[in-house]
Amino acid sequence: MNPRDELLEQRIAGLERRIAYLERIVKVSQILNSTLSLEPLLRIIIQSATELTHTEACSIMLLDKRTGELRFAHSIGEGSEGLRNVTVPLDNSIAGWIVRQGRPLLIRDAKTDPRWHPQVDEAIEFDTRSILGVPLKVKNEVIGVMELLNKIGDRGFSQDDIQIASTLAAQAAIAIENARLLAELQHAYDDLAELDQLKSNFVSIASHELRTPLAVILGYASFLREEVSGEAGEQLEIVLQSAMRLRSIIDDMVNLRHVDTGEVQLERDIFSMKDLITEVTSEFAQLARAKQQVMHLDLPDDPLKIDADRQKVYLVLANLLSNAIKFTPSRGRVQISAQKKGEEVWVSVMDTGIGIPQRDYNRIFDRFYQVEPTLTRRYEGMGLGLSIAKSMVELHNGRIWVESVVGKGSRFTVALPISPFRAVPVATS
């Protein structure tokens, strides 16, 4: 074979090795993007590293920040099973040098290097001759080392081997970081679930313990209110109103807990939405008169029959009407209207109150959210009413939304299907 043909064959062989290397890198990248399982991914990476660099063994060691030692996370080669309990110190070790320097290290004769750590070989009865080590980096922080051991053949480690090892080490670092982030996320979810359960238990216990003494307070206050007059009667009226407000808060907390735990069951019945609106409005009429507000009903002749849970729809309307009166100043106006639209009944509660900024349209339905700053707000309440109303509406496969102008008022609209079998599908974004 003439020199020209020999050179051509060498170039072809080099290109074939390059193609094989790139194919393996692409394969590892595809797996990296399609799985969050760390063990099989590290296994593929170190297997690819040994095959592409023609070495006898490969291992990945991770830095334990608590002990300042390196621990074997994954390895392949003779005796690799025995490495799980072996640690390597940062001081006076080849791997430790790579961690601290943050760059690759090639050693052609390991036993003559003063940093060589013979205890690893002794633990697994392995004979280390040559080492190529590269750091595992995440955002310029070295988290471990990948070592390739004993180059097969007479050529020794090359620059191509360093490039291959560095590329695969970078992919291993990404996989390890992804696994760490996933573990942290899962831990955060577990903590949130525990907190949510504690909150649910607290609400259940607190509401149970508060209801009995509150019922006694309400009973005696109501009785005494009928027996006394004058200044004492006015003071008792304040006590009675405060107790009623506390009962409303407890009811809101219980309703919210039932929604969270999925304990809410719809007790459907066919009833007149027009009659229900009239009933709710009459119950809040005195509260509106106390603020010298005008309350107006705009209802059709149609009774607006609907198949739904009357008590829960009542709760929705009561929350909307209570908010409208609360956030509307004296001598303001509150209007309730209803109409049939296709297969739905639409109920709107309008007011001439403070209004809501458009940026808060969605957030006002979040529990405990207040448009005003918590420490300076003028209006009482825990911010649960709209969240509960939204939950009750969605249980009926309905919708609720707001339109508002700051300083001029708001319109809350509830759209409920007339029948559960004729619900209007809601497009999701």
Image (cartoon, helix red, strand yellow):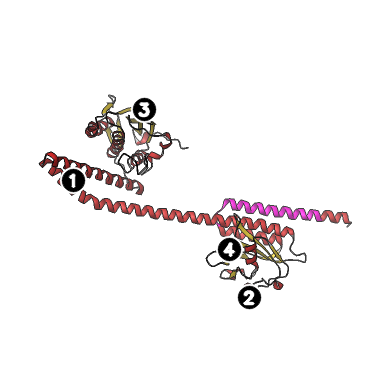
Q: What is the x, y in percent for residue 92?
A: 63, 71
Disc 2 secondary structure class: helix
Q: Is residue 161 magenta?
A: no
Q: Earlier in the sequence, mark 1 or mark 4?
A: 4
Q: Which residue is mark 1?
A: 218
Instruction: Calculate the distance from the C-alpha at mark 2 to the C-alpha at mark 1.
Output: 81 Å
Instruction: Calculate the distance from the C-alpha at mark 4 to the C-alpha at mark 3.
Output: 65 Å
Mark 4 nearby-residue class (10 Å; few <14, some 14–19, many ≥20) = many
Q: Nearer the viewer, mark 4 or mark 2?
A: 4
Specify the quadrant of the image occupied by residue 64.
Answer: bottom right
Query: Could you tell me the amino acid type at mark 4?
Result: Leu
Q: Which residues are magenta?
A: 10-37
Marks 3/1 in contact by CB < 8 Å: the verdict is no
Q: Which residue is mark 2?
A: 122
Q: Which residue is mark 3?
A: 341
Mark 3 nearby-residue class (10 Å; few <14, some 14–19, many ≥20) = few
Disc 4 secondary structure class: strand
Q: Earlier in the sequence, mark 4 or mark 2?
A: 4
Query: Could you tell me the amino acid type at mark 3?
Result: Lys
Instruction: Calculate the distance from the C-alpha at mark 1 to the C-alpha at mark 4.
Output: 65 Å
Q: What is the x, y in percent for residue 87?
A: 58, 70
Q: Earlier in the sequence, mark 3 or mark 1?
A: 1
Q: What is the x, y in percent for residue 279?
A: 23, 33
Query: Could you tell me the amino acid type at mark 2?
Result: Glu
Q: Which residue is mark 4?
A: 62
Q: What is the x, y in percent for residue 99?
A: 62, 63
Q: Is residue 19 magenta?
A: yes
Q: Nearer the viewer, mark 3 or mark 1?
A: 1
Q: Nearer the viewer, residue 33 or 98?
A: 98
